[in-house]
């Protein structure tokens, strides 16, 4: 099984905490109510780059990077990646 397939087969286990929901909504400037469903949609995007590094999974699509704990499948954070040359 390809490494990213491990995460994709556990998609139903992906969740986050209340604080995680608030953090994701703030970081991604989301207006939608279901931040977890939004993240799952991004993870399922055919262009999403999924890889595991240490204790976390990382999912990158477009300018969004989602971090998921590899053992609990908890979304830790999601944020917009800075572009090269950004001053922020």
Image (cartoon, grey):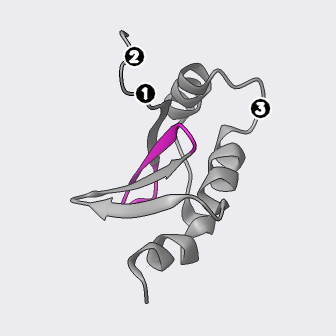
Residues at marks 3 and 2 touching, judged by CB atoms closer than 8 Å: no
53 sits to left or right of 8: left
Identify whether 64 is placed above or below 30.
Answer: below
Distance from disc 3 to disc 2, alpha carbons, whole Å, reads 29 Å
Residue 51 visible: yes
Residue 9 screen position, x and y as percent: 56, 78
Residues at marks 2 and 1 touching, judged by CB atoms closer than 8 Å: yes
Q: Which residue is mark 2?
A: 86
Magenta region:
62-74
Numbered tag placed on residue 33 in the rendering:
3
Is tag 3's residue or tag 1's residue first in the polypeptide sequence?
A: 3
69 is within the stretch colored magenta = yes
Query: What secondary structure is marked by label 1?
Result: loop
Q: Residues within 10 Å of mark 3 (few under 14, many from 20)?
A: few
Q: Which residue is mark 1?
A: 83
Residue 29 screen position, x and y as percent: 64, 20
Kindly indicate the quadrant of the structure image that contains residue 82. Answer: top left
């Amino acid at each position: 099984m390809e490494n990213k397939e491990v995460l994709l087969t556990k998609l139903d286990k992906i969740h986050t905490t209340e604080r995680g929901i608030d953090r994701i909504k703030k970081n991604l400037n989301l207006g939608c109510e279901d931040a977890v469903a939004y993240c799952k949609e991004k993870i399922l995007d055919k262009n999403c780059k999924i890889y595991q590094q240490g204790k976390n999974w990382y999912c990158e699509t477009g300018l969004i990077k989602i971090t998921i704990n590899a053992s609990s499948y908890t979304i830790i954070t999601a944020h917009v990646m800075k572009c090269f040359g950004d001053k922020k």
